[in-house]
Structures are given as structure tokens and as C-alpha cells.
Amino acid sequence: MAMKTLEYLRGISPEDCRRLRAQGIRHTNQLLHATTLEIDRRRLSERTGISPERLLEFGRQCAMLEISGMERFIPVIRRLGITNLKILKRADPQQLHDQIVDAVGLAGAPSLEMVDYWISQARTCDTLEEPDGAPAQWESPALLSREPEGIR
């Protein structure tokens, strides 16, 4: 479980941190749990003045921090278009590994086994309730299909 200070999140402002701390949210793990459901994001938004969409983005970042061994590669992975667990769990391990190697070089890249492990973890982690209203079973950790976004 990755518990980072709120300042660790990309794009969070000192004012956002102050408002969240006023609600008792001090770490990324706490923020993840406070933003998992859409109704919770709306309530937190009302109390903090931070938009539900912004809270969703922060929650997505927090969820990525939960993947063991991936933390130092998150900036690279985000540049590759993988910005949340929903996308990561559908990624092809070999293709993602190749893209990371292209981005950072072989010496700095994780092993293929590590990338496969990240994807496996993403499939077993709870995901955030997305605003598109997709039924929960489509986001099931048991999801075996690696269909691209939008194909169901």
C-alpha cells in the first residue's frame, strides 16, 4: 500500500492539499478511498470546492500508486497514455514493455515479468467508479479480455 503525501500527486495545488487535509485526508491512500465512488467525489467536492472531475483524476493517480514496483515508472507510463488502472489492466505486457524500453532504454527499464506483474495487479485492484456509468461487472478484476477502450 503506497501512502504518499498529497503533494506527490501531479497537478495538485497547495490549496487543494489544505482543503483535503481540512477533511482529514492526509495521504494518497486516504484520498483513493475517499474518491472511489462518484457519490463520494461529489460530497467531497461540496466540502472542499475541488471539482469531482479533478478529484477523479487525483483518485486515478492514487490508484496507480497502489501497483507494487511501478511508482518510479509512473511518469513514463503516463506519457505512454496509461493514466489509470482501467487502461493498464487491458495493456499487452510485451507491447507495454517494448514502449517503456523505447522511452527509457533497456538498462533503465523494468523486466517484462515486472510489467506483466503490474498488469496482473491492476486486474485485482478495486477500480474507481467512472462517470460513464458502466456496470461494475465490465470492470471486474476477473476481466480476461484485453479489448481496447470503448469496445465491449
Image (cartoon, rainbow, N blue to C red):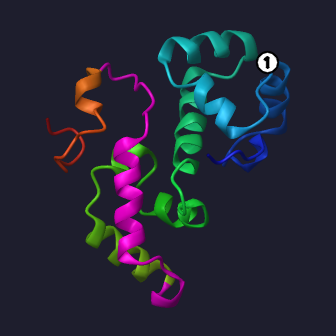
Q: Is residue 5 above or below residue 101?
A: above
The residue sitting at 55% across, 66% down in the picture is 73
Residue 120 drawn in magenta: yes
Q: Position of residue 27 (x, y in %)?
A: 74, 37
Q: Give neighbour class at mark 1: few <14, some 14-19, many 20+ (Cα, 10 Å).
A: few
> Which stretch is magenta?
105-133
Left or right of 56, for residue 30: right
Residue 23 in magenta?
no
- Indicate the position of residue 54 as horizontal and vertical percent values: 59, 30
Residue 33 in picture, x, y percent from top left: 59, 27
Residue that numbered label 1 is attached to = 23
Residue 15 placement (x, y as % from top left): 83, 31
* Viewer-nearest residue: 116 or 52: 116
Q: Amino acid at mark 1?
A: Gln
Q: Count the numbered circles shown.
A: 1
1 vs 22, nearest the viewer? 1
**In the image, farthest residue toward the bottom:** 107
Answer above or below: position of 73 versus 23: below
* Image-based side of 132 in relation to 3, left or right: left
Residue for point 54% across, 84% down: 108
